[in-house]
Amino acid sequence: MKNGFTGVFAIASVLKILVLCVLTLGSYLMYKLYQFSGQINQHTELKISKTFIFITLFLYMLSLGSLLHALANWQEPDILNVMIGFHVISSIFDVTWIIMVRKRINLIAGANKGDKLWLNPFITSIFHVIYMQHKINQGLAKSAI
């Protein structure tokens, strides 16, 4: 099966990505999405809007900051109630970005449902960039043979 990962993506440690995603409270997830998007935009015609990326990262930073503020001020539950709507909007942008990257990786891989390199939407929704990197590693290892 021909895939186009070579020259677009690089092999990276899935365990390292998992650990960094946990230790950074998900911030590394956003970094990896940004990195994947940059690689996709640089090497393919399947562009992801830089404006969309900026808005999503901005919303994520505000969401994370407000969550940390609410946790530091847990005695005031009204703070969290005010931010719920904001977190929902941020989450919608995050999920949309994950879907956009997933779709483009599937197109670059030339993968269809059931193929070895196809990114399953359910598994992607749980493991995000960890699963994406795993499939990229598989594709690059296969093309090196």
Image (cartoon, grey):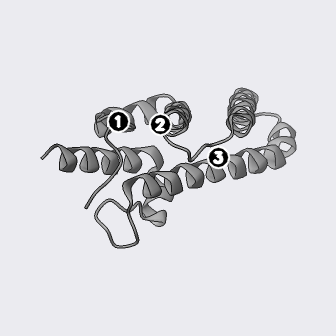
- Give residue 29's position: percent from left, percent from top: 51, 37
Closer to the chain start, of discs 1 and 3, is 1
**Residue at image point 21% right, 47% down:** 143
- Give residue 141's position: percent from left, percent from top: 20, 45
- Marks 3 and 2 sit apart, C-alpha to C-alpha, by 23 Å
Q: Do the residues labelled 1 and 2 touch (CB within 8 Å)?
A: yes
Looking at the image, residue 57 sits to the left or right of residue 98; the answer is: right
- Where residue 37 sits, quadrant-wise, is top right
Looking at the image, residue 12 sits to the left or right of residue 34; the answer is: left
98 over 17 or under it: above or below? below
- Marks 1 and 3 sit apart, C-alpha to C-alpha, by 26 Å
- Give residue 121's position: percent from left, percent from top: 48, 64
Closer to the chain start, of discs 3 and 2, is 2
Looking at the image, residue 98 sits to the left or right of residue 69; the answer is: left
Per the image, the residue denoted by label 3 is 94
Secondary structure state at the residue bearing disc 1: loop
Single out the residue that lies furthest toward the bottom.
Answer: 114
**Residue at image point 45% right, 51% down:** 105
Looking at the image, residue 77 sits to the left or right of residue 115; the answer is: right
Q: In which quarter of the image is the N terminus?
A: bottom left
The amino acid beneath tag 2 is His
The amino acid beneath tag 1 is Gly
- Marks 1 and 2 sit apart, C-alpha to C-alpha, by 8 Å
Per the image, the residue denoted by label 1 is 7
Question: Residue 43's mark?
Answer: 2
- Where residue 20 sits, quadrant-wise, is top left
